[in-house]
Structure formats: C-alpha cells, structure tokens
Amino acid sequence: MTADNILTVDGLSVSYGKFNAVQNVSFSVRKGEIFGLLGPNGAGKTSTLSAVEGLLKPQAGTIVVDGNDAASKPLHARASLGVQLQSTSFQTELFVIEVLQLYAGIYGVPASKSDLMATLREINLEDSAMKKFGELSGGQQQRVSLVIATIHNPRLVLLDEPTTGLDPQSRRQLWERIEAIRERGHAVLLTTHSMEEAESVCDRIAIIDHGRVIAIDTPQGMIDKHKSDPEVIAVSRRGRITLEDVFIALTGKAIRS
Amino acid sequence: MESSIPKISTVLKTLLRSDFTTQWRNRRAVILTLIVPIIILTTWKPFVAQLGGPFVLSNSITIGLVAIGLMGYSTSIARDRDKGIFQRLRVAPISSWSIMTSRLLVQMAMILMVTTAVFIAGSSYDQVTLTPAGYIVTYLTAVVGGALYLSIGQMIVGRIQNPETVNSTVRLVYFVFIMVGMFGQFSTNAELHNIVHWSPYGTVKTILASGMEPAKWDNDASMALLVTLGYTIVCAVLGIKWFKWNTK
C-alpha cells in the first residue's frame, strides 16, 4: 500500500457456497481519483463492493480503507466510507429531512435541522423535506442518496451503479456531483455497465469478469493498448475503437444472466 | 462535517428516535394490537367472578404480547430486510446489535403500553385492581413473556425470507395461539389441558396471573417462569443463528 492509496484491495476472494464470485482480486484507489469497476452481469462487481462495505465476509484477502484494516477495525474502515447501494431504500415512514437526521446521527455528524435544510437546498430539494423518500422521483432519490452517502465527508465514496434508470439530464447532473466529490480531494469507487459513464468520469477503470480482474488502466490507456487486437477490431461497429469495443472483446459477446 | 466513529449513546438515541417515529406513524397497527386484548377483557367480564380478575387480565395481556412479538416485530423486520433498509444501516459505522437493540426497545415499550392499557381497562370496566407489588411484578413478567414471543418472531423471520410468507405465517401462528391457548385451557381433557399449560401461551399466562398476586406465587409459577426463559433462549438462539440481514 502506498501513502496515496485511500483503498487497497489485495487478493480478495468471495464465495457463495461453492460458487466463487470473486477470485484473488487486487486493485487500489488513489486519493482524488474516480475509479470504475466494469463488468458484465454477475461478474463480481457488487460482491467486491459489498466486501469493501463490510456487508460480506471475504474468504481471503485484505481490504484497507484509509489505513484501517476492514477485518480488524471494521467501524473505523466504515467511518471513512460513504456508500450508495444499488437499490437504496430508507425507512418508508420517515420524511426526507428525518432520514437525513437519522444518517447524520449515526455517522456522528453534529448537523442541525437548518444545516440539513441547507444541504437539501443545495440539491434543489428543499421543498421535498417533508415528503417521504418513496414519493420522490428516481433522480431526486439518487440526489438524496448521494447526499446521505457524503453527509459525513468520507474519504472514499462507493457508488453501486449510480446512474441506472436515470434520464440523461439526471445522469449528467450526477456525474457533475461525482466530479465535485473528487474536486474536494475525495476518492470515488463506482461500478457501472455504462462505457460512456466510465469514459466520461473515471480516471482509471478495472474490467472484472468471472470474478477476476482482467485489465486495469485509464479508459484511453485501455483503448490504446487494445486497439490493434484482432478481437477488438472484429467487434468494432463505428470505424473507430471505443471502450465498449475493448470491453466486449475482453469479456466476450455472450449475454450474461 | 468530518467522519468519526459516533458514540454508542448517540447512535442508539438516533436509531430510537427513528424507530419510535416509524412506530408512531404506524398508529393503526398499534391500535389494533391494543384493541384485541381490550375486547377479550370486556367480553370475558363474566369470567371475573368465576375465575378471578388475574385469570382474565393475564389472558388479555398474553394475547397482546403474542400480537406484538409475532405481528408487530417479525413483520416489520421482514419488510425492512426485504427493502434493504438494514443493509443501508449496516454500511454505517455502527454495530449490528445496536440496530436490533433499538428495534427491541421499541417493542418493549409496546409491551409496557399493552400491559398498562389492560390494567386501565381492567380497573375501569371489570373493577379489577392489584396491589402495588402486583402491578410491578406483572410488568416484569410481561417483559419476560414478551421476550418469549419476540424470540418466536425472531425465529420465524430467521427461517423465512419472503416478507409475504412471514406475514401469512405469523397470522397463522397468532390464530393457533389464540385458539389453542385461550380455549384449550377450558378443555376437560387432562392431557390437552396439560399441553396448553406448558405451551408458550400457557407458561406466560401462568407467570402473568401469578405475578398479579405475588403472595400466591408458587412452585408451578416458578416452573412456568423457568420454562418461559428456556423457550426464550432456545428460540432466540435459533432465530439469531438463522437470521440473514438481506434476502438476496
């Protein structure tokens, strides 16, 4: 681990019974970096993220978050993490402002109601403070989820497919918010199916398939490295090599479950 | 806003405020939990003269406790687990036990509320009053009895993942408890009477009735208390062992 790394995953393996979802995965996320985990369905992205979040106990490997070993100091590791899960749900009976109060409290953030209202104002949801989370649109829910994920100013933000189901406007807005997190000096680890998203916002990406990391590089570096591969040229559709062409060539054309 | 590990007291206070708010917004379910014991109390008024106030009050409280443990606790846990609410909480720097402690404390408050409501209704409608020691011991035995039904609820929600199946299962178990527990004790069949007496319904009813008259607490009540604690430990251990925080 170098001093620049905010997250170091080394030799991570996760199994569900006899099925090995993640096998000997290693990567690191540097300070001020947006790192993307790309892979087909069932490749092991969410399992990797769940292990980092502390929701899954890995069979092997180490995870170090901001200098804290996730196995021996789980609370310290989780305190440095902000998390947006794939399908986020909050207590359905609570108003948005109450959900924010709940998460400010459990992250130990001394935020008053007016502080939280100001936070909602920043994301144009001040008028929704007394609405229940389920009454918000998909884009509004994502904004609230991201605010909650970053309410304690974490060193590393984990986003599991954050733009799934969003319209282009909401997606662009979310990208800007993710980039704003990086500009504050924090790191972001996100999973995505979208090659456009990976190319647009990620500084580096790792392609994961069948539970193994098969490539790590910058998006452009990955294109440059593989653009002459016959498999990549064979799957290219637009006359120029894109990240999606490289991804398809590396992971195969077969549809995953 | 800097990250830090929050104090346990701050976490519990925050979780409790959230869980009590949720409970308050589910007032209809709370009222239903209170109404059934009160209905039993009022319809069984004729039994007060024949079988005594503690008999009627203990049955009413037992039904209330069953409703809290099965209908209230397990269905809310199954629903929140299915929606991923627990997973979201568990990625925060808080221990899993603090999440459950908060949930259980809310149910404990419900147990005290049901017991108090039965006391008030029993006093005003059936003119059944207890000694101060009787009230205190009954509150304690209600907590012990409530813990048994919460542990049964935990076992059900541990074994069954689907919230709809949990919902229908607890309704069925609740119905069985009412039918077998309440009416089985009137059976003239000695074997059935004995089974009901030592069932989770019967032992809780016994310690509640005995607690209402502490001076009459006997070996049968002590044995019922031990059996209740035994049931609670077994169900809680199995419920915790089987429990999964998510349904995926």
Image (tube, coloured by chain):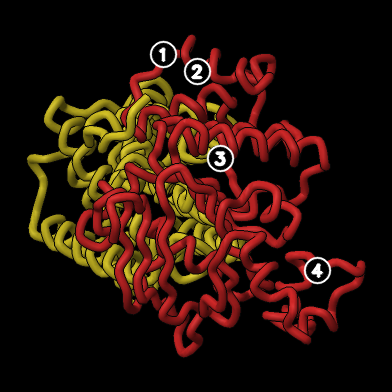
Chain colours: A red, B yellow
Q: Which residue in the protein does label 1 denote?
A: A112
Which numbered disc, 4 or 1, marks the residue closer to the eye? 4
Which marked residue is nearer to the observer: mark 4 or mark 3?
4
**Residue A90 shows which numbered tag?**
3
Nearer-N-terminus badge (4/3): 3
**Chain of the residue under label 2:** A
**What residue lies at 68% left-to-right and 68% top-to-bottom?**
A224
* Label of residue A241 in the image: 4
Q: Chain of mark 1?
A: A
Q: Is residue B113 above or below residue A241?
A: above
First-in-chain label (4 vs 1): 1
Mark 3 vs mark 2: in front: 2
Residue beneath the point at 50% across and 86% down: A19
Q: Which residue is label 2 attached to?
A: A116
Image quarter of residue B194:
bottom left
Badge 1: how crowded within 10 Å, few (<14), some, or many (20+)? few
Mark 1 and mark 2 residues within 8 Å of each other at the beta carbon = yes
The answer to whether B98 appears left or right of B214 in the picture is right
